[in-house]
Image (cartoon, grey):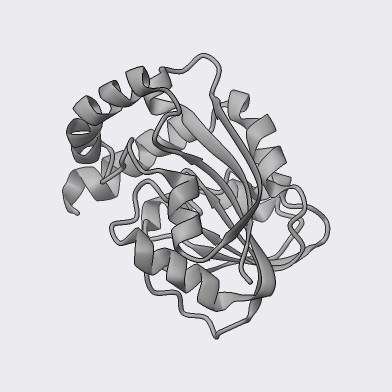
Amino acid sequence: MGFYGTAVLPRLINATAGVKALDPLRRRVCAGLAGDVVEIGFGSGFNVPFYPAAVTRVAAVEPSDLAWRLAGERLRAAAVPVQRAGLDGQSLPFADDSYDGVLSTWTLCTIPDLTAALAEVRRVLKPGGTLHFLEHGLAPDERVRRWQRRLDPLQQRIAGGCHFTRPIADLLTAAGFTIEELDVFYEKGAPKFAAADSLGTAMSP
């Protein structure tokens, strides 16, 4: 990944992802998680304070060593056991049908082979298990989409492969998930091209 990807980008993400304005969204997406959970794209652990008491343990999938170190204070304060258990969402080191839930926040935009990653999520979820997701992606309005398409190549270069234009709900459905809840909205106070969010839950049959 080079110096920028390993030493600079994780710090930038840590600074932008930790803003308090995102806390209500994190609380919403974590609500209802229970049992054994995988969090893909754990980052520096900003979801940790919002894990419900019903969660028994979390397996954190995070490729960045620096992001994991930046999570140290939140991990020490966690009420739920959290263990770094994987580096790549496209190849999860877990047995089939072994987890009750999966959590993903602002992660599906960046995974290179998203089809493979979603297949892995379905594989490790127990039948009836749920993916809780909070992702930015393709906007609902064509005017905003035009800007997303223009800016997407630049975004991928400066943000570690992040895409503005992934249609999150369609991709989840194509992967075999049944979407149970879905809220599509623009984050307040952010440019619409970068803040068209989808928040919800999707069940693995």
Residue drawn at 58 percent across, 43 percent down:
46
Q: Nearer the viewer, residue 185 or 2?
A: 185
Which residue extends farthest right? 53
Residue drawn at 30 percent across, 62 percent down:
113
Residue drawn at 36 percent across, 68 percent down:
116
User: In the rendered image of this protein, does residue 86 appear above or below residue 186?
Assistant: below
Q: Position of residue 174 (x, y in %)?
A: 44, 60
Q: Is residue 101 something that shows in the picture?
A: yes
Quadrant for the N terminus in the image: bottom left
Quadrant for the C terminus in the image: bottom right
Q: Position of residue 133 (x, y in %)?
A: 57, 49
Q: Is residue 88 something that shows in the picture?
A: no
Q: Nearer the viewer, residue 145 or 80?
A: 145
Residue drawn at 52 percent across, 81 percent down:
94
121 relative to 200 in the view: left or right: left
Which residue extends farthest bottom? 95
User: In the rendered image of this protein, does residue 101 appear above or below residue 136?
Assistant: below
96 relative to 162 in the view: left or right: right
Count the marks. Answer: 0
Q: Position of residue 107 (x, y in %)?
A: 44, 49
Q: Quadrant of residue 111?
A: bottom left
Q: Position of residue 32 (x, y in %)?
A: 77, 53
6 relative to 168 in the view: left or right: left
